[in-house]
Amino acid sequence: MSVKPRNEEEGTLPDRIALAMTDLAGAMGRLNDLVAQRIGVGTSDLLCLHTLGREGSSTAGTLSARLGRTTGAITQMIDRLERAGYVRRKPDPEDRRRVVVEAVPESLGKIAALYVGVDARSRRLMSRFTAEQLDVIHVFLNESRQIMVEESDSLTGDDRTR
């Protein structure tokens, strides 16, 4: 790994930011692992639920592309989540031959309740920044996410960007 500083006092500011991003990703991964355990699903299943909550109902094919899993793996995931009461299948309103998957609203509420503390603490943290600073942070986070998507696509041979 090219990020060399071991703590917040070493390296250039970009090095320290890259290190902080790595640490943040690890902490977020740990939190999501714990939430997934708490609700009795796997971390990929939780990511699927987050995606459905954010983007709305979806086909298995779209979830497959979004989550970087095979359609077979997505079908198994949907089966697990449906048995656990977190999602339901319904006919696609645009093409009745297809099925879409939607999260059960109560399940999303149950999951959201586990993030209330981090949401409140994050909002308190954001209140310390000006609107202009928050705008820069927002741009940085969105563009960093796009970089991660593109790098993931390059590792899987998928040249589409989302």
Image: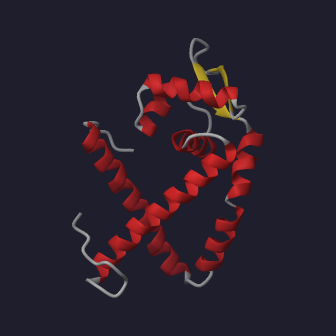
Quadrant the C terminus occupies: top left
Judge whether residue 59 can be spotted in this image: no
Can you give x and y, in whole percent of width and height, for residue 58 in the image? 57, 31
Identify whether 23 is placed above or below 36: below
Q: Residue at x 24, y 63 (%)?
A: 1
Q: Which residue is drawn at 61% across and 72% down?
A: 122
Please say which color scheme the image uses: secondary structure
The residue sitting at the top extreme is 97
Can you give x and y, in whole percent of width and height, for residue 50 in the image? 59, 46
Q: Locate residue 86: give its quadrant.
A: top right
Front-most of 160 and 156?
156
The residue sitting at the right extreme is 106
Can you give x and y, in whole percent of width and height, for residue 82 in the image? 67, 27
The residue sitting at the bottom extreme is 9
Identify whether 95 is placed above or below 22: above
Q: Residue at x 74, y 55 (%)?
A: 113
Judge whether residue 112 can be spotted in this image: yes
Can you give x and y, in whole percent of width and height, for residue 29 in the image? 50, 56
Q: In this view, does 27 lie to the left or right of 16?
A: right
Q: Locate residue 139: give its quadrant.
A: bottom left
Q: Residue at x 75, y 48 (%)?
A: 110
Front-most of 85 and 96?
85
Counting the numbered discs, the total is 0
Front-most of 3 and 103?
3
